Amino acid sequence: MAKVGIVMGSDSDMPVMAKAADILEQLGISYEMRIISAHREPDEFFEYAMTAEEKGFKVIIAGAGMAAHLPGMCAAIFPMPVIGIPMHTTSLGGRDSLYSIVQMPTGIPVATVAINGGANAGILAAKILATSDDALLQKLKEYSASLKESVVAKDAKLQEVGYKNY
Ligand code: RP5
């Protein structure tokens, strides 16, 4: 059974949602990925959200753009954490998506990451699962250590070659 549901409002969201899936794959976390539009097919959406718990999902990552109701409506139905990813938009730069997702009413939270923040959504989902999975927690610690190593290596190169040759 997949532990994470990844759902997006349109295939145009795929480049960002793929970053969340990439992180889950790196960490060995099972997921199911779907394209479901809360606006264009509300019946399909309702079925998805109503059956998410019985499918075994512990977290849903939902991404959408513009009047982005998908994450909030997932949170209204699914009883466990929902992470929202606001998509960048050409019309309003993603502020439309961000405000639609982050400004939830009391009682129905959506953990909202940055505009186009697909990778962080994957990492946050992993951290939620790691609260009850020591092996996954260890993998996340190793991931954090790799981030540090990458910065240390960049600084070492800067010291070696100087900024003009970096
Ligand atoms: C939203 O509308 C989707 O999540 C997408 O970000 C946006 C545009 O969808 P398309 O017109 O590209 O299908 O529902």
Image (cartoon, helix red, strand yellow):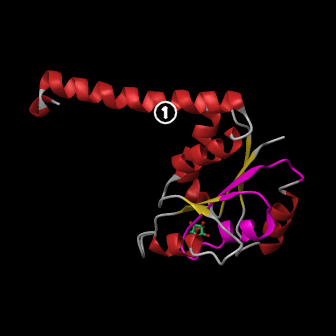
| Residue 42 located within the stretch drawn in magenta | no
The residue singled out by tag 1 in the image is: 144
Above or below, 13 relative to 142: below
Helix, strand, or loop for circle 1? helix
| Residue 67 located within the stretch drawn in magenta | yes
Quadrant of res 24: top right
Local crowd size for mark 1, using a 10 Å CA cut-off: few (<14), some (14–19), many (≥20) = few
The residue drawn where x is 62% and y is 75% is 104
Quadrant of res 164: top left
Figure label count: 1
Question: Which residues lie in the magenta part?
Answer: 54-82
Q: Quadrant of ligand 1?
A: bottom right
Q: Is residue 117 left or right of residue 162?
A: right
Q: Nearer the viewer, residue 95 or 125?
A: 125
Q: Is residue 100 left or right of residue 165?
A: right
Q: Nearer the viewer, residue 44 or 114?
A: 114
Residue at the farthest top position: 160
The residue drawn where x is 64% and y is 34% is 25
The C terminus lies in which quarter of the figure?
A: top left
The N terminus lies in which quarter of the figure?
A: top right
Q: Position of residue 84 (x, y in %)?
A: 60, 61
User: At label 1, which amino acid type do we have?
Assistant: Ser
Residue at the farthest left position: 164
Q: Nearer the viewer, residue 164 or 90?
A: 164
Q: Position of residue 124 (x, y in %)?
A: 59, 48
Q: Nearer the viewer, residue 127 or 31?
A: 127
Above or below, 164 relative to 94: above
Residue at the farthest right position: 54
